[in-house]
Image: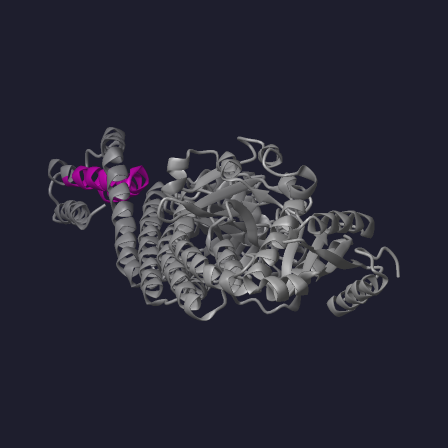
């Protein structure tokens, strides 16, 4: 137990021998032998006490008076001293073992902070413990493919994978040490033939409370309780260091991510920088940042993608509902998997390439009912997702979301500024669709839309994305009808307050049918397909000049507060554009209007004729044309003067306007010639209208001089399919009517 007891025992024994050799009597030698036996038995146990008793008897048997009683006293002293010293020896051995374990722990802990990262720390453990004389085999096992693989071992071993059913797996699952004193009695023990083993100690290594590895020790001799206690504390210290390294790792990455977000100038640049950092930090293959834009997920940026099939997916985007990114978009919950092939919503191209590990996380969008963007990272090889990695990605998504929101706001401002610049350079007709297309791209949740502009007291479609604009142009809405669609008061509309309509709350198609013909609005406007609508009134000086409609055809929850805020960006450029449009339109109308009669002039006729002809070609509608030449006008003008001639032309214009049907258009062709367009009217209908026109003009007389008219008709497509062909046919028939002396020539 100690050198002191050994010296005392040996000194007493030698003193007894010396006294015996000097020839002293028994009472003087015997006590010293008893002291020596008692001291040795007390300090080192009964066996050593009995051995020393035998030696003492050898020296004492020659002394007169030494008998069996004296021998019994020696043996009794050994036994009593042994019993008295048993607890002392046990405490001494425990103290010695604890001291050794503490020494081992202190030396190991001193080296732990030197590791730069978690893998370096884990790899160093076997070598460190082997150098400290733990003995046997020391290995660090990490989870892999349903079992465990050795990350590092000392000495090296032949096993490269073990199932999760053994001692290592048990310690990993239970997150507590597992000590097997005799592996021969352990059914779950997985032997290595090259390593003679009696005892096994498996110690889980935790990172933020999660088991990430197992420190496993095997040796041919038992582990003392003090060794188990010391090594358990060592594993706890390693776990604390792993958690500290995880915290440091996360802080470093988030700091770098924040710096990259601050330096980025565009959304695409920020996304690329974030992906490059996260893919490298997590040791993954590739990543993509998806953005939900209506019916598709579009790749805002990607990193590490090289396979042609995956590049095609990135180029085309993800159709609605295809891919785990859509699941995350709908649920708002992150998803981590190492069994991608078993996921029912996976991308076929990824499954075909054998991808197994994937993480998809929502990137927060302030004010949005759903996260507009989804971060996806992964690799082919299966790997478990550690809690530290999950925590890092969740924090990274929050940081990424804030950075992207700043750049999104900047992007919207730049888009609106470009619209104002375009207003100075582009034709107005080209700006309507451009503003709408920018709004559809920049307002979260939008995938289609339309723009209705107030013209002559009614709202008409002037631009559309995702709809049939030509078909929609046939519809006009009253201010009351638009307020019914808007669903709020006129006062709110004049404030430019946008509103959101969801198919889960109100039947959108039913509301549309109350304001427009169902056969038109369902076919051209796809009203029955709209799942969510955002309507933005555009007011200016006490009047709502337009309504901007943005739609989603797939998701009833597509629009949120972020959509409303983004839509408001477009109110100012639209109001400016529409005000400018009105000013230009007044000037344009002056150029397209005959100043004497107030009818549209020949230039207006040619423009309207081309528009109606295109519509007729597209939808197979008939279109009729009438060319009219007055009879008797020259005598009125020559005899009664130009003032009477002007009055005659004005009266002709009034008579034609009174007979005009809804949808027909009357023009002053020039001089004493007029023209009319009859959209969606076959020749029979045009003939009836022409006779009414002729009858009305025939009733006009001035000081006994009466007027008449010769009318030539042509109809698309039987009389021609081009503007020139139809004009030529109508003009020819007009001259034929004049030659034959009839008002309307029915046939050639």
Q: Which residues are magenta?
A: 32-60
Can you see residue 147? no
In magenta segment, residue 47:
yes
Q: Nearer the viewer, residue 274 or 585?
A: 585
Q: Is residue 435 visible?
A: yes
* Magenta part, dominant SS: helix
Question: Would residue 628 be found to the left or right of residue 291 on screen?
Answer: right
Total marks in image:
0
Q: Where residue 548 sits: x, y (%)?
A: 49, 48
> In the picture shown, does residue 266 fall above or below 440?
below
- For image coordinates 88% across by 57% down, the residue present is 747
Q: Residue furthest right?
A: 748
* Colouring scheme, one of rainbow, by chain, secondary structure, one colour: one colour
Across and down, in percent, residue 323 comes to 61, 50
Q: Nearer the viewer, residue 445 or 706?
A: 706
Residue 66, image x and y in percent? Answer: 22, 34
Tell me the quarter of the picture where residue 608 sits.
Answer: bottom right
Q: Please provide percent x and percent y for residue 536.
A: 45, 45
């Amino acid at each position: 137990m100690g050198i002191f007891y050994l010296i005392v025992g040996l000194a007493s024994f030698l003193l007894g021998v010396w006294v015996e050799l000097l020839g002293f009597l028994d009472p003087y030698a015997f006590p010293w032998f008893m002291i020596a036996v008692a001291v040795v038995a007390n300090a080192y146990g009964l066996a050593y006490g009995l051995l020393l008793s035998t030696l003492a008897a050898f020296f004492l048997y020659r002394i007169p008076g030494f008998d069996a009683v004296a021998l019994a006293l020696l043996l009794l002293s050994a036994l009593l001293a042994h019993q008295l010293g048993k607890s002392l020896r046990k405490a001494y051995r425990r103290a010695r073992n604890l001291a050794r374990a503490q020494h081992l722990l202190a030396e190991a802990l001193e080296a732990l902070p030197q590791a730069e990262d978690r893998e370096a720390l884990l790899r160093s453990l076997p070598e460190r413990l082997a150098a400290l004389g733990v003995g046997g085999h020391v290995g660090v096992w990490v989870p892999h493919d349903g079992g465990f693989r050795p990350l590092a071992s000392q000495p090296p071993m032949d096993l490269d994978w073990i199932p999760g059913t053994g001692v290592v797996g048990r310690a990993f699952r239970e997150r507590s040490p597992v000590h097997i004193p005799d592996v021969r009695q352990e059914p779950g023990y997985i032997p290595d033939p090259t390593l003679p083993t009696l005892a096994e100690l498996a110690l889980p290594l935790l990172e933020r409370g999660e088991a990430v590895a197992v420190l496993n020790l095997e040796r041919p001799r038992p582990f003392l309780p003090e060794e188990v206690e010391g090594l358990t504390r060592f594993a706890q210290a390693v776990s604390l260091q792993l958690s500290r390294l995880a915290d440091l790792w996360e802080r470093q990455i988030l700091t770098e991510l924040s710096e990259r977000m601050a330096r980025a100038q565009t959304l695409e640049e920020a996304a690329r920088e974030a992906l490059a950092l996260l893919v490298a930090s997590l040791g993954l293959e590739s990543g993509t940042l998806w953005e939900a834009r209506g019916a598709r997920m579009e790749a805002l940026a990607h990193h590490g993608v090289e396979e042609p099939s995956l590049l095609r997916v990135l180029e085309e985007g993800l159709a609605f509902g295809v891919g785990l990114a859509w699941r995350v978009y709908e649920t708002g919950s992150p998803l981590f998997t190492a069994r991608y092939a078993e996921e029912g919503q996976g991308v076929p191209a990824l499954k075909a390439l054998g991808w197994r590990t994937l993480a998809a996380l929502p990137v927060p969008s302030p004010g949005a009912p759903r996260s507009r963007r989804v971060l996806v990272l992964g690799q082919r090889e299966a790997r478990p997702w550690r809690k530290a990695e999950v925590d890092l990605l969740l924090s990274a998504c929050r940081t990424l979301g804030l950075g992207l929101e700043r750049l999104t706001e900047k992007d919207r401002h730049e888009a609106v500024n470009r619209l104002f610049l375009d207003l100075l350079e582009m034709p107005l007709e080209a700006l309507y669709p451009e503003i709408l297309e920018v709004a559809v791209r920049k307002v979260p949740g939008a995938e289609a839309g339309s723009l209705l502009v107030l013209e002559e007291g009614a709202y008409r479609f002037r631009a559309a994305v995702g709809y049939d604009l030509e078909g929609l142009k046939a519809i006009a809405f009253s201010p009351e009808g638009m307020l019914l669609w808007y669903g709020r008061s006129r006062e709110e509309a004049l404030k430019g307050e946008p509103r959101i309509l969801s198919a889960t709350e109100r039947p959108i198609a039913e509301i549309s049918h109350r304001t427009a013909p169902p056969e038109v609005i369902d076919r051209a406007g796809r009203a029955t397909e709209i799942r969510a609508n955002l309507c933005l009134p555009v007011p200016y000086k006490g009047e709502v000049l337009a309504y901007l409609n943005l739609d989603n055809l797939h998701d009833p929850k597509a629009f949120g507060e972020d959509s409303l805020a983004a839509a408001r960006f477009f109110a100012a450029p639209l109001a400016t554009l529409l005000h400018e449009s009105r000013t230009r339109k007044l000037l344009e109308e002056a150029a397209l209007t005959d100043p004497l009669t107030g009818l549209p002039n020949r230039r207006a006729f040619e423009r309207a004729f081309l528009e109606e002809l295109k519509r007729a070609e597209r939808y197979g509608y008939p279109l009729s044309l009438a060319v009219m030449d007055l009879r008797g006008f020259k005598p009125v003008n020559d005899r009664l003067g130009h003032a009477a001639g002007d009055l005659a032309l004005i009266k002709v214009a009034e008579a034609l306007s009174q007979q005009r049907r809804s949808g027909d258009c009357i023009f002053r062709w020039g001089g004493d010639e007029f023209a009319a367009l009859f959209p969606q009217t076959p020749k029979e209908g045009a003939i009836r209208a022409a006779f009414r026109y002729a009858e009305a003009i025939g009733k006009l007389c001035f000081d006994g001089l009466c007027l008449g008219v010769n009318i030539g008709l042509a109809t698309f497509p039987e009389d021609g399919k081009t503007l020139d062909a139809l004009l030529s046919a109508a003009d020819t028939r007009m001259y034929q009517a004049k030659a034959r002396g009839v008002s309307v020539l029915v046939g050639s």
